[in-house]
Image (cartoon, rainbow, N blue to C red):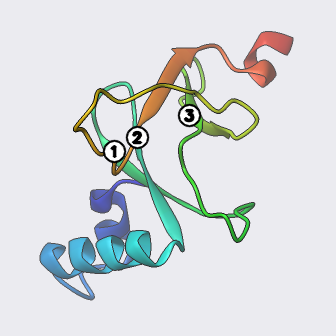
Amino acid sequence: MSSNDVHMEVNDLCDRATVYRVLGRLVDEGTIHKVVDVDGVIKYAPCERCTTEHHHDHIHFSCERCNAVTCLEEVVPEFKMPKGYTRNTVNFTVSGICADCNKG
């Protein structure tokens, strides 16, 4: 869900700024994670299979047919940062047709 989706779901129970703050805190606590879709929209998803070694450096797959966004936790990209650079967050989104849509 995007922050706008969350704001609509709470039926104006709180303002947009509060929604952003709460989403940010939940990301910091590791309860949810941010996904940037292929259109550049930030969406949030619950952490369902995270272990004590909490990481979100996996690939997200965005289906062009059903619009589902799926975490592909078994695909972990590897890369080296240049000397002097420190990595904080990584967002990988691959676009295509998901396995369910390919069945039909």
The residue indicated by pointer 3 is: 60
Q: Estimate the x, y position of residue 32 in percent, counting from the top left.
A: 51, 66
Quadrant of res 98: top right
- The image's mark for residue 32 is none
Residue type indicated by callout 1: Arg
Mark 3 touches mark 2? (CB < 8 Å): no
Please give the name of the residue rendered at 31% of the width and 80% of the height, measured from the top-left corner. 22
Mark 2 residue crowding within 10 angstroms, few (<14) / some (14–19) / many (20+): some
Quadrant of res 59: top right
Q: CA distance from mark 1 to mark 2?
A: 8 Å
Q: Residue furthest front?
A: 83
> Is residue 64 visible from the viewing direction of this image?
no
Q: Earlier in the sequence, mark 3 or mark 2?
A: 3
The residue indicated by pointer 1 is: 87
Position of residue 79 relative to residue 54, above or below, is above
Quadrant of res 37: top left
The residue indicated by pointer 2 is: 90
Q: Earlier in the sequence, mark 3 or mark 1?
A: 3
Please give the name of the residue rendered at 69% of the width and 29% of the height, measured from the top-left corner. 75
Please give the name of the residue rendered at 86% of the width and 13% of the height, measured from the top-left corner. 103
Q: Is residue 61 left or right of residue 82?
A: right
Q: Secondary structure at mark 2?
A: loop
